[in-house]
Every structure is written in structure tokens, then in C-alpha cells.
């Protein structure tokens, strides 16, 4: 069969790797893709937000399955556009992708259906928000309602910071219309865990757990980024946590969406925080995490096409998800300066060192092929993933492998997976 993947990051490279492993797939396309994805796929120059063009391409090439990697096209309704043309596509429709597209929607849903989350209020008026902040407890969390590349969340330690935050989001509109509405919520403390779940509209199947490192600098300092590294599984995701989430989070989230007439098909990414009072949902996303996908997919034993088709056909209950009994760690190699300004077009050397090494992967994020070779083309450049029998072994392997590649201004965190030592 023929598969089209939509996106251009490390996540889409990890998806392409999983799709290429399927014995059912003869041909892979990726739009727009990157230099690493070219190893598995023919990259086509159509942007992820060119919804009609993407669907026309899929129709013309008789694509059997399209996989949407990114959030923006999902929230914009790419799945509806494909379905209207009779095309098979993996991802939630627009009316379900709102789970990621609007934080106010997801908070209201959790409140209505008693899914455990932080207490909150929603505001469309900056003055009302400021009035509320006069009498709040600190720290407190401000969230832009809409998509903001994972950067629309402000943790405010003081009233002054929070007032400034309201200005940034609602008046200065740093994230555009994403800040027309904001959610102000209770600050929670605990370990964070990401659980990505396959969904078929009725059934939900959680994958193995993972933990991201969102801040740019060691010790969780610096600015929020898309994610600087991950490990899987999380040693803090215990049997008790799993049982709690199965009872109070996963199926209840699916049922809630169904009850609202918004059947959710695709990947429901549930961001959890493990508080003293138990797990709480921090956020939902409507797609694979990046770089969570780079540690979860290499450990998945199932044929990804079988699983995705079962999701589309409402037959996820016939699939038994299986993961290898090992661990994986991904360290992101970024361009120094990310998530702010950084330089591009730096030659990347050493990529060939990953060839024929079974438990090592170099997933491309911001890369580009030129006449001189493959060069950097983004903030997050590569995701170096390694497996190991244990988390510690996987971490040592991943850091060893970060030495195999080089480019000018290469930057990484040196403490990805440090939490493992505290487990
Ligand atoms: P979100 O995009 O909602 O996951 O938020 C991004 C990051 O902000 C999360 O991964 C947490 O580290 C942090 N965060 C979000 N909400 C809260 C909260 N209520 N309490 C503490 N930290 C939070
Ligand atoms: N790594 C977090 C995300 O993909 O949203």
C-alpha cells in the first residue's frame, strides 16, 4: 500500500521509520518532510497547512492511508478535507482536534466529566483576569487558549508576573488570537508523564509512558521549548498510577468526547502530572508528541499500519499493543540559541555513523539537503535515540551517540533522564 505522512519534524521521521518497517507498505511519501525522512520516503513540496493541495495529491497518487503528524493541520480540519474526498486518514476530525486546539474547551470538558485536573477559570477580558489575580494564591499558571507551539503557558510566581503575563497574552497578543481567551489555573507540583494513546472513537489504548524535558537548559532552567529530550518508560508511572488513569482518565476522556458528539480517532496525547493527591491531567494533544514519538515508536512491536487502520475502522479492541521490555532515551541536538534566534545552514557531519546500528537512531527535525551535504535548518536539528536493557544503559548509549554527529553551534541538555537516578 501507499502511505503519505504530513509533517517535517523528528516526530514524522520516527513515524516514517515505523511505517517503513511494515511489510504492508510499498511506497511512502512525506509532505513536506526533511533530509532524514528521505531515507524512507519521497518528500513532496507541499506545506502541512495546504490542506486541499495535500488531499489532491493523495487522490492523484491513490494513497491508501495518510498520517497527520502535526497539530496545526488537524486543528484546521485536514481530516475533514480528506474524508470529504473519500480518502482514508489517521487523525482526529476538526471537531475532536479542538481537544488540543482550545485549552478552555479541554478544561471545561474535564470539569463536566469529572476528569481530574487543576482548578481553573477562563477569561476573555483582560480586566476581569487582572481582578481575579488580585486575590489569587501564587504561583499560578496562565495559558493561552489556542495553539502557541507549546510556548503559551506562563508559570507566574508573583502577582506582578501574572499581571505582566495577562498583558503579554491578551493585550500585546504575543501568540496572536491564541491569547483572545486565557485559562488561569492552579499551580501543581509533581513528576510529569506523557501517555500517548491510540483511539478509534470508542476504544482507547495507552502506549508505554514517556517523560519529556521542556525547558531549554539543564536543571529545567531556561525557556520552554518543544522538548529537549525524552525517556521511556517512566519509572514514576507505576502500576497504581496506571490503574488510576485507566479508571479516571483514559476511557472517561474518550467517553466524554463521544458524549459531546466529538468522537476522537487518532492519537490522544495525555500530559499528566503526578501530584501528592494523585495524577492530574495537565493537557491533551491530538497527535504524537515530539520527541515522545522518538522513544515510544522504536519500542513498539506492533505493525503501526495495523494499529492505525484499526483506529480508523473502530476496531482497536482487536489489537493487543505490545512494547519491548527495554528502555529508550532521546537527546535533542539543537542550534545554540533555540528557542530564540539561532543560525542555520551549518553542515552536519557523522550521520553515517548510525548506519547498521540496530539500537541507535538519528531522527532528523530541522535539516535540509544541499549540494554540500545535509545542513541545519531549524532550532531542533536532530533527535539521537538509543535503546538499552535499562533506562540507565539507554541514557549512556544515547549520550555516547550524540558524539557521533557534529555541526557548528550544536547544543544539547546534559541531564536528559537525570530523574531516572531518583526513581
Ligand atoms: P501544557 O502545554 O499545558 O502542558 O503546559 C506546558 C508545561 O507547563 C507543562 O508541561 C508543565 O511543565 C507546565 N504546567 C502546565 N500547567 C501547569 C500547572 N497547572 N501546574 C504546574 N505546571 C504546569
Ligand atoms: N513534547 C511535547 C509535545 O509534543 O507537545
Image: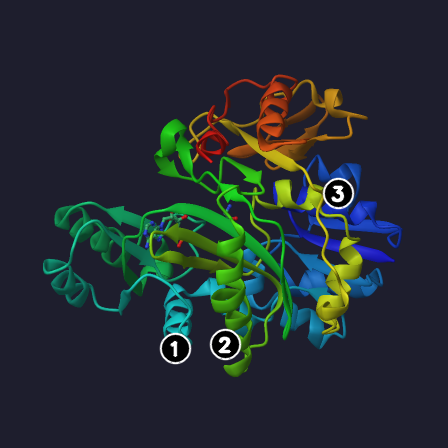
Q: Which of marks 1 and 2 is nearer the N terminus?
A: 1
Q: In which quarter of the view is residue 214 placed?
A: top left
Indicate the position of residue 198 as horizontal and vertical percent values.
Answer: 64, 61
Residue, x 70% and y 69% (percent of image)? Answer: 82
Residue to which mark 3 is pinned: 17
Indicate the position of residue 68 as horizontal and vertical percent values.
Answer: 65, 58
Residue to which mark 2 is pinned: 256
| SS for callout 1 | helix
Image check: 242 left or right of 58? Answer: left
Tell me: residue 308, above or below residue 149. below
Residue, x 50% and y 61% (percent of image)? Answer: 245
Q: Which residue lies furthest to the front in this view?
A: 240
Residue, x 46% and y 38% (percent of image)? Answer: 213
Tell me: residue 355, above or below residue 201. above
Q: Are marks 3 and 1 in contact (CB under 8 Å)?
A: no
For the N terminus, the quadrant is bottom right
Residue to which mark 1 is pinned: 112
Q: Residues within 10 Å of mark 3 (few under 14, many from 20)?
A: many
| SS for callout 2 | helix
Q: Which of marks 3 and 2 is nearer the N terminus?
A: 3
Using the rendered image of the protein, determine whether residue 88 is visible from the camera's viewpoint. no
| SS for callout 3 | helix
Q: Do the residues labelled 1 and 2 touch (CB within 8 Å)?
A: yes
Q: Residues within 10 Å of mark 2 (few under 14, many from 20)?
A: some
Image check: 61 left or right of 414? Answer: right
Amino acid at each position: 500500500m501507499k502511505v503519505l505522512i504530513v509533517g517535517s519534524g523528528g516526530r514524522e521521521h520516527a513515524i516514517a521509520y515505523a511505517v517503513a518497517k511494515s511489510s504492508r507498505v510499498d511506497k511512502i511519501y512525506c509532505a513536506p518532510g526533511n533530509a532524514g525522512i528521505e531515507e524512507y520516503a519521497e518528500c513532496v513540496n507541499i506545506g502541512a497547512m495546504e490542506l486541499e493541495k495535500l488531499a489532491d495529491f493523495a487522490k492523484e497518487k491513490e494513497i491508501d492511508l495518510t498520517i497527520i503528524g502535526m497539530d496545526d493541520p488537524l486543528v484546521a480540519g485536514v481530516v475533514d478535507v480528506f474524508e470529504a474526498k473519500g480518502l482514508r486518514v489517521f487523525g482526529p476530525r476538526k471537531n475532536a482536534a479542538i481537544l488540543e486546539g482550545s485549552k478552555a474547551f479541554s478544561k471545561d470538558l474535564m470539569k463536566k466529566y469529572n476528569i481530574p485536573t487543576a482548578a481553573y477559570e477562563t477569561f476573555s477580558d483582560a480586566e476581569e483576569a487582572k481582578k481575579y489575580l488580585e486575590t489569587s494564591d501564587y504561583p499560578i499558571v496562565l495559558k493561552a487558549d489556542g495553539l502557541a507551539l507549546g510556548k503559551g503557558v506562563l508559570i507566574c510566581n508573583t502577582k506582578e508576573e501574572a499581571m505582566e503575563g495577562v498583558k503579554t497574552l491578551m493585550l500585546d497578543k504575543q501568540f496572536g488570537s491564541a491569547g483572545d481567551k486565557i485559562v488561569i489555573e492552579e499551580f501543581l507540583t509533581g513528576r510529569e508523564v506523557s501517555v500517548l494513546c491510540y483511539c478509534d472513537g470508542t476504544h482507547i489504548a495507552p502506549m508505554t509512558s514517556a517523560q519529556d524535558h521542556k525547558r531549554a537548559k539543564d536543571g529545567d532552567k531556561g525557556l520552554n521549548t518543544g522538548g529537549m529530550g525524552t525517556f521511556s518508560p517512566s519509572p514514576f508511572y507505576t502500576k497504581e498510577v496506571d490503574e488510576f488513569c485507566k479508571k479516571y482518565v483514559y476511557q472517561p476522556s474518550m467517553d466524554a468526547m463521544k458524549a459531546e458528539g466529538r468522537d476522537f480517532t487518532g492519537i490522544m496525547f495525555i500530559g499528566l502530572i503526578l501530584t501528592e493527591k494523585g495524577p492530574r491531567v495537565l493537557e491533551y494533544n491530538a497527535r504524537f508528541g515530539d520527541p515522545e514519538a522518538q522513544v515510544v515508536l522504536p519500542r513498539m512491536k506492533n505493525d503501526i499500519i495495523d494499529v492505525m487502520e484499526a483506529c480508523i475502522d473502530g476496531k482497536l479492541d482487536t489489537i493487543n499493543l505490545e512494547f519491548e521490555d527495554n528502555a529508550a532515551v532521546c537527546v535533542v541536538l539543537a542550534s545554540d540559541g533555540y528557542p530564540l534566534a539561532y543560525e542555520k545552514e551549518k553542515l552536519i557531519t557523522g550521520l553515517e555513523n548510525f548506519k547498521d546500528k540496530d539500537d541507535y537512531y538519528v531522527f532528523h527535525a530541522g535539516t535540509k539537503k544541499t549540494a554540500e551535504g545535509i545542513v541545519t535548518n531549524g532550532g531542533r536539528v536532530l533527535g539521537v535515540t538509543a535503546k538499552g536493557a535499562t533506562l540507565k544503559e539507554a541514557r549512556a548509549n544515547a549520550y555516547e551517540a550524540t558524539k557521533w554527529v557534529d555541526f557548528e553551534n550544536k547544543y544539547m541538555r546534559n541531564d536528559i533522564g537525570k530523574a531516572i537516578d531518583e526513581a
